[in-house]
Every structure is written in structure tokens, then in C-alpha cells.
Amino acid sequence: MSKTESKFIGVDVGGTKILALLVDDDGEVLGRSKRPTQQEGQPLADQVAAVIDDLLAATGTEPGEIAGIGLAVPGVVNSQTGELVHAPNLAVDDPWIAERIRERYGVPVAIGNDVNLGTLAEAWHGAGQGASSVVGIFVGTGIGGGVVIDGRVHVGAHDQGGEVGHMVIVVDGPPCGCGNLGCWEALASRTAIEREVRKAVDAGRPTVLAAAAEEEHIRSGPLGKALKAGDEVAVEVMTRVAHYLAQGLLTIKHLIDPEVIVLGGGVMEACGDFLMPLIEAEVRADKLRASREGPRLVASQLSDDAVALGAAVLARSEVAELAAAAACACPPAGEEPTAAYPRLDSVSFGVVVVEGEEIPNDIYIRADGKLGKRKKKAARKKYGTSHVVDAEELQKVCKGQPRTVIIGAGFQGMVRLTDDAKEFLNGLGADWQVLRTPEAVEAFNAARGPKALLLHVTC
Ligand SMILES: [Zn+2]
């Protein structure tokens, strides 16, 4: 597949709408489809598939033309397995949505957090274009953030990277929705703004926001208008918010020192004219000396498309990574395998090449060097999917006391171990690792001493 022919689909799976974009290799949007998110009934994966099908039909695109699909979700994603761990704003629970979309379309499916991916899009195609490090800050009901370094989202070791809204800015400050005290979003989000405006109204202070404060939420629009009109309460509350935002940005500056900080979200969009100069002045006045002036503070550029576009960018980089990993899975030329194990030449979608022979199947290799085809029926029968490995299956694979056990969890890392499987491996006294299939091939080839492999190649 040549670069210019690649098309990707990015899907923003939101609490109120599902937006899918068809995007070419350069991030150009070729088409879009949108449907409201149903909060009950239809499984989420089916809802997403319906929007993707709309998009394919509307743009006259065959599923075979799609190189990869990216999903952006409002929640915590396990970056190792692709599991959607926690999504409070999605009433329809579907933890393995990425796997189900992949099964349906037969292409690599990447999944990530929506704010991270919004930042990724700004870094590739928006306000942070060309910068090597970009932090995105989105001020709305809460404060979301994302960190992109060298074109990749920094998700951290436990998928908590970029959770800037919960940096503690005031020790023992006001309570945050997360349970901690004094978090950034408890001080500078719309939720905090509402709280402060209501406090002023309750104290009898005159403000044009008095009526808005009686509604469930004070929307960004009236807030922006109150600022323009010079409303005393609005100006006071938002000046304080600008101070808190700037103080948080100083911490980000000192921790990450990004080239660009992109500021977006409803509050920034409505009140940016007021907030930006205050924030900028305070960040510039940083007393801590740096070698050069920075970072650049810029307003987000991509608005409603950002998250879906970021999902497409994620899909594109995962597809490129998989291709690179498959290409370098062979041992260096001239080097003979040192043990009596079959040599894994390469792996691509649906096929692993062992000693020159193509095997279109999951495989295992035991410590004694025996290679066999994995019987996926057993797992399907017990768990409804071949993506579960239990202790019973591992006992067969791990005969002969391997010192290293490698489990190749598929190209998207979808295979998971049952608790009893992990217990079994821990009891084995071997080093064991669950890796994505291309990395697993590399790790198995590189491992010395008695070793065993279970490799998921195809469903
Ligand atoms: Zn918090």
C-alpha cells in the first residue's frame, strides 16, 4: 500500500453524538457522518458501526480501501489491551468495543482517550503543527489535557498521563469530583466558575449572571457576554480563573517544558479574549529562568473535528508501527538461531512465517521446541471469543519448564489472560510477558534458554 492511497476513519464516540471522519494520509477530511448516541438498547459497537457504514456509503468507499480505524472515547483506555476501562459519560457499556469493530471490518483498530486524541490532532494538523512537544488544555465542565511528544500521545505507564485537571493547585482547596481537594478543575473549570458566581449571587451582589445562575448550568455564552459588558462579578471571578489557569500552566511548563500549549474547550472559546492576555502575562512573568523564552500559548484551531481527526491520526501511526514491527521481526542476516527452536521469520495480519513456511493460524511453541497450532475452539466455547487465555491452555503450552514465556496478544493486544492464568504463570517461576504480536515475535526470537510462546495471529 503506497502512502498516498491510505485512508483512515477516525470516530469521536461522544456522550451525545458519534462523529466519523474519512481522512487521507495527510489528514485531509474526505467525508463525515454523524448520529446521536443512544443511551440505551443498541450496543455501542453497533452504533459506531452504523455511523462508519453511513460514512462508507456517503463517500462511495469500499471497506477494503480503509487502512485502519481509530476510536476516541470519553474515558480511561488500557493502552496495553485496548480495553475501555471506565467511561462515566457513556451509558452503554462496551469495554471491548475496539475489538468488535476490528472483527467487523478486519482492519487494525486503535483506541484512545478523546482529550489525548484532540491534542494529537492539534499537534499534527492544528495549532501545534510542527512543534515537537505539545500540551493541550481543554477547559469545560472539567479540565482535560493531553501531552504529545514527538508526534505521539504520552499516556504514561498506567494510562494516567495528561490528567492535568487533577493537578493539585491549592493544597486542601475546594473538593473536586475525583475525591481529592484543590484540583485544577475544582478551581478553574466551568463547574468552579458556576460555584463562585452563585456564591456572589447568594451574597446579594448585583450581576447580569443572576438569572443564568438559577439554571442548572451557567453556559459559556452568557459568561462571555457578561465579561464584554464589564460585569463586576464576572470580571472578578474570571480574573481569578485566569490566575489559577496560569498557575497550573506554570507547573506544566516546569514539568514538561512543551514548545506549544494549546488552549481550547467551551470556556476558552467563549472567554478567550478576556482570559488569554491575563494568562499569557502571568506565564511570561515566570521567575524561574529558562534558556529561552517559551512556551507558545495558542488557541485550539480544530474545534468539533479535533477528536475524530486525532483518532484517525492514532490509527495511521499504529498501522505504520505494525508494518515496521513486522518488517524487522526477522533475525539479522547471517545469524543462525542458537537454540533448537523454530525461527519466526515475520508476522503480518492473519499469517505468521516460521522457517519460511506461512502458517495462517495462532501457534504455540513449547519449551522442547515443538510447534503446534493453537486450538481456539476451546476458548471460544468457554468464553465466546478466542481472545481469552486461561490456565488450562497455558499448562499445555508451558510443558517442560520454560524459563521465559511470551504471549503474543494480537496486533491490537486484544488477548487477555484470566486471573487463574496469571496465577499459573506466577507459580511457574518463569519470566512471562504479554506483548503485542509483532513485539512478541521479536522477544521470543531474542530470548535465550528454555522458552515457550503462545502467539495470537488471527481470529
Ligand atoms: Zn480532581
Image (cartoon, rainbow, N blue to C red):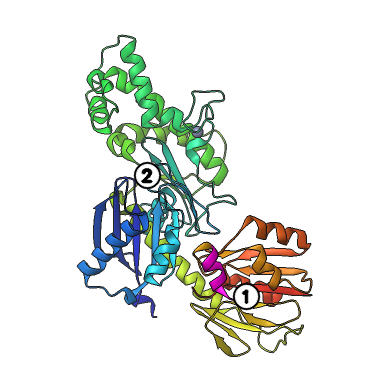
Marks 2 & 1, CB-CB < 8 Å contact? no
Q: Which residues are magenta?
A: 375-382
Tell me the residue at 28%/75% (across/down). 62
Rendered location of residue 171, percent (x, y): 56, 25
Rendered location of residue 17, percent (x, y): 28, 49
Q: Is the CB of mark 2 within 8 Å of ligand 1?
A: no
* Mark closest to the chain's N terminus, 2 or 1: 2
Q: Is residue 273 magenta?
A: no
Instruction: Name the residue that disc number 2 marks.
Output: 91
- Lateral position of residue 94 relative to residue 53, left or right: right
Tell me the residue at 61%/58% (across/down). 418
Q: Which residue type does callout 2 highlight?
A: Ala
Q: Which residue type does callout 1 highlight?
A: Val
Q: Is residue 335 visible?
A: yes
- Lateral position of residue 250 relative to residue 302, left or right: right
Q: Is residue 447 visible?
A: no
Instruction: Name the residue that disc number 1 marks.
Output: 441
Label 2 – label 1 distance at C-alpha? 38 Å
- Lateral position of residue 390 relative to residue 400, left or right: left
* Element class at badge 1: helix
Q: Quadrant of the N terminus?
A: bottom left
**Which residue lies most toward the top here?**
204
Work out whether 181 lies above or below 114.
Answer: above
Work out whether 412 lies above or below 38.
Answer: below
Q: Few, some or many C-alpha atoms within 10 Å of disc 1 (few <14, some 14-19, many ≥20)?
A: many
Rendered location of residue 41, percent (x, y): 32, 50
The quarter of the displayed image where residue 333 is located:
bottom right
Which is more foreground, mark 2 or mark 1? 2
* Element class at badge 2: loop
Rendered location of residue 225, percent (x, y): 22, 28
- Tell me which secondary structure the magenta stretch mostly adopts: helix
